[in-house]
Amino acid sequence: MKKKAELTHLDKIYWPDEKITKGDLLEYYSKIAPYILPYLKNRALSMRRNPNGINEPGFFQKDVGDHAPDWLTTAEIHAESTDKMVNYLVVNDVDSLLYAANLGCIEMNPWNSTINKLEYPDYIVMDIDPSPKNTFDDVIEVALTIKDILDRIGIDGYCKTSGSRGLHVYIPFHKKYDYDAARSFAEILASLVTEYLPGLTTLERSLAKRKKNHIYVDFLQNRIAQTLACAYSVRPKPGATVSAPLEWSEVKKGLSPKQFTINNMLDRVKEKGDLFKGVLGKGIDLQKALQQLDALHETKSSQ
């Protein structure tokens, strides 16, 4: 018979300045479960653990270990980097979600693809990664440029805060194409963004090498085993911020990721519903989209 997750040390302080406890985190995940679980279901979870709260160093744990309860769903996946099998946790229900959170997983980092079709992601991710010199208004400008390009080629994009300093734009892929195709599309889109915003954006990943006020348009998140905090995930950041799906009308100057926290996200999602559900919907026509991106590039180059 399946057992419930055993919850421990509920009074431990995870956010000292806000006096937010581990118990508060668990209560949040228990209540937000209907909204976050669609973005975790059947996906390997790379566990980022902060068992002593946000002011102590955290660590990533991919293998769930030999002592996990037998009612958990897990998936053995070969890791090319170590040539070993890794037994990943798969969060398919509230108890599994609370099990992960009880281990100190403040943040939930699922794969972009499900365990039954590992090589085929459900979405493309554009990760807008600012330099320390950038303002959040700079990040917003990049997101709106991505939105403008997607609008021009008739593709829906879905934006969320990272819960930290960036924004993420997701594009539905619906397991129709593999990671190589996803990464190629993302790279072309990112390159076009840098053409539109040459003084603000770059494809240079290294902070040391890029100009101090340039934002990295990260297309490399579109690789197998790469992860980002999913929609509705809490982040181990001051204020107990949450990765919050946004209406595009909200993506404008003055927006701040600090607006969305463990204390108000449930009320927000009850009011607005799941703004991110389209991410798991019908995927794009890749060939048509690539042709349209190429046409935009030609137009931009001729100007």
Image (cartoon, rainbow, N blue to C red):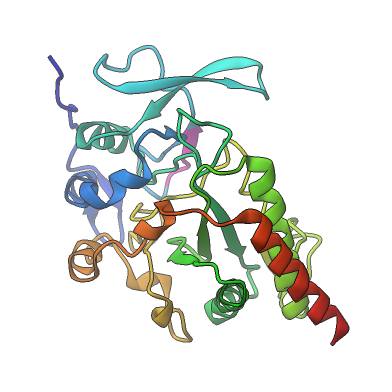
Rendering quarter of residue 19: bottom left
Give the overall secondary structure of the magenta segment: loop
- Expressed as whole percent of the image width and height from the top left, the position of residue 236 reads 40, 52
Whether residue 212 appears in magenta in the rendering, the answer is: no
Where's residue 282, x and y in %? 45, 54
34 w.r.t. 9: above or below:
below
The reply to whether residue 93 is visible in this rendering is yes
Q: Nearer the viewer, residue 19 or 260?
A: 260
Residue at figure coordinates x 76%, y 80% from the top left: 199
The C terminus: image quadrant = bottom right
Q: Position of residue 162 (x, y in %)?
A: 47, 61
The residue segment tinted magenta is 56-60
Q: Is residue 58 magenta?
A: yes
The reply to whether residue 190 is in sight is no
Q: Is residue 119 left or right of residue 217?
A: left
The quadrant where residue 239 appears? bottom left
User: To which quarter of the image does residue 99 belong?
Assistant: top left
Camera-side residue: 257 or 273?
Answer: 273
Q: Say which of 64 and 287 sits in front.
A: 287
Residue in the foreground of this view, choosing between 154 and 102: 154
Question: What residue is at 24 percent from the left and 35 percent from the top?
Answer: 93
- Position of the N terminus, as image quadrant, is top left
Percent position (x, y) of residue 220? 67, 50
